[in-house]
Image (tube, rainbow, N blue to C red):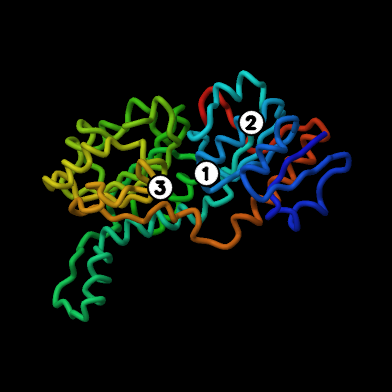
Amino acid sequence: MKAVLPALARPLVEPQLPPGLDVHWFMSTDEAVALVADADIGWLDNNDPREWARAVAAASRLQWLSTIYAGLDALDTNLLRTRGTRVTNGSGVNAHTVAEYAVMGALVAAKRFDQVVRAADRHEWPTDAPGKLELFESKALVIGYGTIGRLIGERLAAFGVEVTGVTRSGAAGTVGPDAWRALLPETDWVFLAAPATPQSRAMIGAEELAAMKPSAWIVNVGRGELIDQDALIEACARRRIGGAFLDTVTPEPLPPEHPLWSTANVIHSMHLSGRSQTRMFLRAAALFVENARAFAEGRPLRNEVDLAAGY
């Protein structure tokens, strides 16, 4: 059984791999593409989504694709389904740091700490605080109450926030996809931690923004496609909402001339939430080894993705 894996992971996974694997290690996308045509197992991640998709597309016989990423929106999931490729993702690998980043985003927005930092850069000493919102006794919607969403909710609860989770199924303790919009007029914080699917794209649009409180903020650590960015730009420019803390946008990187950079009350963090930690790759390597052993033994794989749903 042939496996094509990143050379960077070799020291972490090679000593623990199950016997019988014919392992090939790659350093570049071109190397991965050259090796993967007849591979059974592939871990083909690349920081450039287009290069990742190129490597995956070349893997025509792949039985199992492993990825450190949670979202698969860069890939042709219909092609993977047609080929019969099973996919496991990295859900949970960076969940804690993304949840911490989301709560940081709310705190930065509440106290407008971005403006505090800029005042310090100018050597100014303000006599008043630029942000006066409190998380205590505020209300939050966390849309996408999976691994990351639940961790966001737990951390917000410690600040005294009343949290409502939103799930596709409307599972116990959450609301479903048809109920959350009715809660927008009383919500102070809208956290987006959902995957990008045909159903979730532009889920925050002009109608949703119009329903929000004038003081409410959006914190997006999901995908840029979850928001209608043109509608967001207009809503922020006209002060119809408090603002938005955006870890994810579309496209990425955001072009320097894009109006979202200069839109009033929009704070950017350039998709750094998942990278702001030191143990993600260690967790990813341990997850791959666990699944490699399970795959070799015919046991269920951890974090297997429903390709029809996209996550």
User: Would you name the residue on which mark 2 appears?
Assistant: 58
The residue type indicated by label 2 comes to Ala
Report which residue position mark 3 lands on: 221
| Left or right of 96, for residue 134 | left
Q: Do the residues labelled 2 and 1 touch (CB within 8 Å)?
A: no
Residue that mark 1 sits on: 147
Q: Position of residue 131 (x, y in %)?
A: 20, 63
Say what amino acid the circle numbered 1 marks.
Thr
From the image, state whether disc 2 or disc 1 is nearer to you.
Answer: 2
Q: Give the CA separation, mark 1 to mark 3.
A: 13 Å
Say if residue 30 shows up in the picture: yes
Secondary structure at numbered mark 2: loop
Q: Nearer the viewer, mark 1 or mark 3?
A: 3
Task: Count neighbours of disc 1 (C-alpha within 10 A) and say few if under 14, some if 14 to 19, many if 20 or more.
Answer: some
Q: How crowded is mark 3: few (under 14 residues within 10 Å), some or many (20 or more)?
A: many
Q: Position of residue 271 (x, y in %)?
A: 42, 51
Drawn side of residue 240 relative to residue 78, left or right: left
Residue at image location 28% in from the left, 32% down from the top: 181
Q: Which residue is located at x 79 percent, y 52 percent?
A: 14
Residue 283: % across, % down:
65, 53
Cα separation between marks 2 and 3: 30 Å
Q: Are marks 1 and 3 in contact (CB under 8 Å)?
A: no
Q: Is residue 115 depicted above or below 154 in this figure?
A: below
What's the amino acid at mark 3? Val
Q: Earlier in the sequence, mark 2 or mark 1?
A: 2
The structure residue drawn at horizontal position 63% and vertical position 32%, both measured from the top left corner, is 87
Return the x and y of residue 253 as percentages of the image width and height: 38, 48
- Foreground: 69 or 200? 69
